[in-house]
Image (cartoon, rainbow, N blue to C red):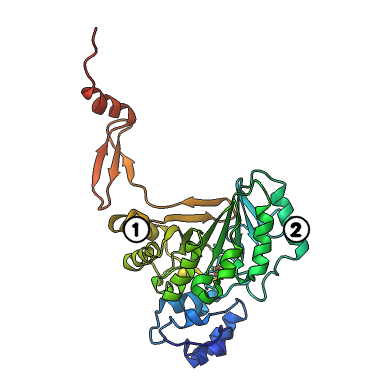
Amino acid sequence: MRSSARTLRRPAELVGAGLAPPERLGELERVAARYAVAISPALAELIDPADPQDPIARQFVPDPAELTVAAEERADPIGDDTKSPVAGIVHRYPDRVLLKLVHVCPVYCRFCFRREMVGPGGRPALTPAELASALAYIRERPAIWEVILTGGDPLVLSARRLRAVVHDLAAIAHVKIIRVHTRMPVAEPARVTRDLVRALKAADKATYVVLHINHPRELTAAARAACASFIDAGIPMLSQSVLLRGVNDDPATLGALMRALVEARIKPYYLHQGDLAPGTAHLRTSISDGQDLMRSLRGRYSGLCQPTYVLDIPGGAGKVPVGPSYLADGGAVAGALEVIDCVGRRHAYPSAGSCQADAVRPHLPPVKR
Ligand code: SF4
């Protein structure tokens, strides 16, 4: 494992830190000219340079495969722009909006679904006037119950600026939930200070923090301590992971990740099918592989360790669960079903009508006349 004192942003720095061999410098530079690169010291330290398949390196060290764009891939894979009525807002569902304050992150993930928007060459942060318009949009719509701060990573902002945004949101009576999506506790745990944690809290509102994490090694002691500082302050935590080929697409790694999260008091929330972002085909799995992995989790791990496997429908139609079904048609009897257990055995289950007729009525006392 190597450590560096500061975030590595240039290909020559990655080579200098031993995260890629010198002969790869040219290809790293070609990718870096197209997509943002940043590896924080905390994550660089987790990479084993002797392992060409290292799952942390695979998430952050550029790969020339990123320059090959598959026919089905698109610049805005989940359709943020089609659902953006004003700058900074994505309004896809009636009761919640995304509020994208910034488009920079402490690290840049090679599979990022917003890779055409984030990074130093990406979209700028909201101006004060744009932020005022975004807040006015939320204020004028009583149906908006939840505001999700995302980006980029909103926790790159100072505690002072976050406090101001949370204060403005908290002043809107119909906004009850403030949800913050971040990679900061694993990427730069030291940035999660007491001041920053306090900045996210607002009287009479519930704040949730959703950690983005893909491999159990990311949950270091420092990352766990950063998460504990949210939870101990009364901010519940959930997690989001992306299913990534060569990173977490095996039952043991995925199970270890979910258990590590639950042990850290973080409830696994979503496991995402990889979005159709440009140049990410080498990191995506098939949905049927994802369903097999979900079956393996269901059979072996506590219910607390079960995330919902979801797909963001390309184009902006929203998120839907795509996990395996445990019900099958029961065959000859109309309406009957089969239930499939965790090891694949099938069990007959009567239809609703026959359930009443066969299971309940025999136990009723005879009708007195
Ligand atoms: S932290 Fe999120 S927004 Fe930033 S590069 Fe990674 S996936 Fe993209």
Q: Residue at x 74, y 52 (%)?
A: 136
Mark 2 residue crowding within 10 angstroms, few (<14) / some (14–19) / many (20+) = few
Type of amino acid at the residue the image marks with label 1? Asp
Look at mark 2 in the image and give the residue it sits on.
132
Do tag 2 and tag 1 residues touch (Cβ < 8 Å)? no
The image quadrant in which ligand 1 is located: bottom right
Q: Please state the horizontal and vertical placement of residue 338, each as a whole percent of the image.
A: 28, 40
Q: Please state the horizontal and vertical placement of residue 80, each as a whole percent of the image.
A: 63, 58
Q: Nearer the viewer, residue 327 or 204?
A: 204
User: Disc 2 to disc 1, how far (Cα)?
Assistant: 46 Å
Q: Do we see residue 117 in this rendering? A: no
Of circles 2 and 1, which is in front?
2
Q: Residue at x 67, y 58 (%)?
A: 167
Q: Which mark is residue 292?
A: 1
Q: Residue at x 69, y 69 (%)?
A: 123
Q: Nearer the viewer, residue 346 or 298?
A: 298
* Residue 33 as seen in the image, left or right of residue 291: right
Disc on the earlier residue, 2 or 1: 2
Q: Secondary structure at mark 2?
A: helix
Q: Please state the horizontal and vertical placement of residue 112, each as a whole percent of the image.
A: 55, 68
Q: Hey, which quadrant is residue 152 in on the image?
A: bottom right
* Residue 354 as seen in the image, left or right of residue 3: left
Q: Which mark is residue 153?
A: none
Q: Do we see residue 132 in this rendering? A: yes
Furthest-right residue in this view: 129
Q: Hey, which quadrant is residue 351 in on the image?
A: top left
Q: Which of the image's four quarters has the C terminus?
A: top left
Type of amino acid at the residue the image marks with label 2? Ala
